[in-house]
Image (cartoon, rainbow, N blue to C red):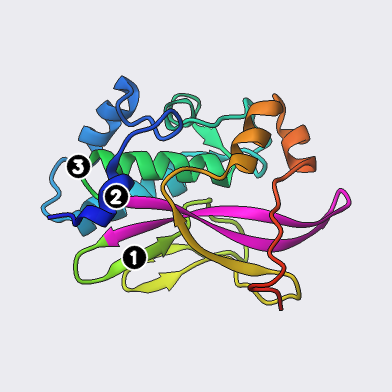
C-alpha cells in the first residue's frame, strides 16, 4: 500500500495524462501477464526506451509534451519520454516521478542542458532511477533494481545530479516543449537550470 507522501506521484495531470484513453489502453496492455510491480515497471520501461523514438536521434517531428501525444506519435525528447513512462507507471498504481541531470552540452552555444529521466518507487527498494531516453552507442540504460544503470554520469565541472523527485515536470521543460514546434528549435534551446550553491563540481 502506498504511503501518504507518495500519493502525489500517483496522480494524473495535464502532462502526465494517464487518464487519456490511448494511455489507459497501453497501460492495460503492458500489464497483461505481470504478477509484480517490478515486472510491470520493467515492461513499461523497456517499451518507452525501445519503442518510442528519441526525437533528436531519429530526427523525428512533431515535438511532443504530454504522455498521450508521445504515445500517439511514437516520439519524444528525453523529457517527453519520461512523462510517458511516469504515466504508464502511475496508471498501474506504481508511484513515479521525474528527475533531472544537468550535463555539459557544448553545442549551439549552450554550456549546459537538463536531461530528463524517471524515479520509480518499488517496495523493498525505495526510489529507483531509470532512464528510458533510448539506447545509442556508448550509452547503456537498463532496469536492474536496486542497481541503477544510467547512461549519463555527472563528472564535469558545473554538471549536477538534481536530487529532487518532481511529480510534475519543471516549468522550463514545459515551456521549451510548448514554445517550439520543430525538433531543431528544441535542440538549440534545451532547458537549463541554475545549480550554483549545490552540486557544482
**x, y (%) of residue 154?**
63, 72
For this rendering, which residue is in front, 72 or 119? 119
For this rendering, which residue is in front, 10 or 104? 10
Q: Secondary structure at mark 1?
A: strand
Q: Which mark is residue 6?
A: none
Q: Nearer the viewer, mark 1 or mark 2?
A: 1
Q: Which mark is residue 31?
A: 3
- The vertical placement of 76 against 7, above or below, is above
Q: From which residue to which does the magenta span run?
A: 96-121
Q: Mark 2 Cα within 10 Å, few/some/many (few <14, many 20+)?
A: some
Tell me, yes or no, whether the highlighted magenta stretch contains residue 106: yes
Q: Which residue is mark 2?
A: 43
Gap in angstroms between the C-alphas marked 1 and 2:
17 Å
Residue at 35% over, 39% down: 87
**x, y (%) of residue 71?**
43, 30
Residue at 40% over, 51% down: 97
Q: Is residue 158 left or right of residue 119?
A: right
Outermost residue on the right side: it is 109
Which quarter of the figure has residue 119? bottom left
The reply to whether callout 3 and callout 2 are in contact (CB within 8 Å) is: yes
Q: Secondary structure at mark 3?
A: helix
Q: Is residue 16 left or right of residue 21?
A: right
Residue at 41% over, 47% down: 167
Question: Disc 1 or 3, which lies upstream in sequence?
Answer: 3
Q: Mark 1 Cα within 10 Å, few/some/many (few <14, many 20+)?
A: some
Q: Which residue is mark 1?
A: 127
Amino acid at each position: 500500500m502506498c504511503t501518504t507522501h507518495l500519493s502525489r506521484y500517483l496522480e494524473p495531470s495535464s502532462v502526465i495524462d494517464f487518464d487519456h484513453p490511448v494511455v489507459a489502453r497501453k497501460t492495460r496492455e503492458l500489464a497483461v501477464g505481470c504478477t509484480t510491480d517490478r515486472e510491470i515497471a520493467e515492461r513499461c520501461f523497456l517499451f518507452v526506451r525501445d519503442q518510442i523514438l528519441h526525437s533528436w536521434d531519429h530526427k523525428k517531428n512533431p515535438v511532443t509534451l504530454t504522455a498521450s501525444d508521445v504515445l500517439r506519435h511514437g516520439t519524444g525528447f528525453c523529457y517527453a519520454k519520461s512523462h510517458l513512462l511516469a504515466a504508464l507507471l502511475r496508471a498501474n498504481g506504481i508511484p513515479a516521478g521525474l528527475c533531472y541531470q544537468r550535463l555539459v552540452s557544448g553545442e549551439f552555444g549552450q554550456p549546459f542542458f537538463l536531461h530528463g529521466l524517471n524515479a520509480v518507487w518499488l517496495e523493498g527498494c525505495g526510489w529507483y532511477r531509470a532512464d528510458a531516453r533510448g539506447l545509442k552507442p556508448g550509452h547503456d540504460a537498463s532496469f536492474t533494481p536496486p542497481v541503477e544503470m544510467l547512461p549519463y554520469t555527472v563528472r564535469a565541472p558545473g554538471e549536477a545530479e538534481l536530487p529532487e523527485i518532481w511529480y510534475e515536470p519543471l516549468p522550463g521543460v514545459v515551456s521549451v516543449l510548448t514554445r517550439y514546434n520543430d525538433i531543431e528549435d528544441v535542440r538549440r534551446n534545451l532547458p537549463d537550470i541554475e545549480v550554483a550553491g549545490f552540486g557544482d563540481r
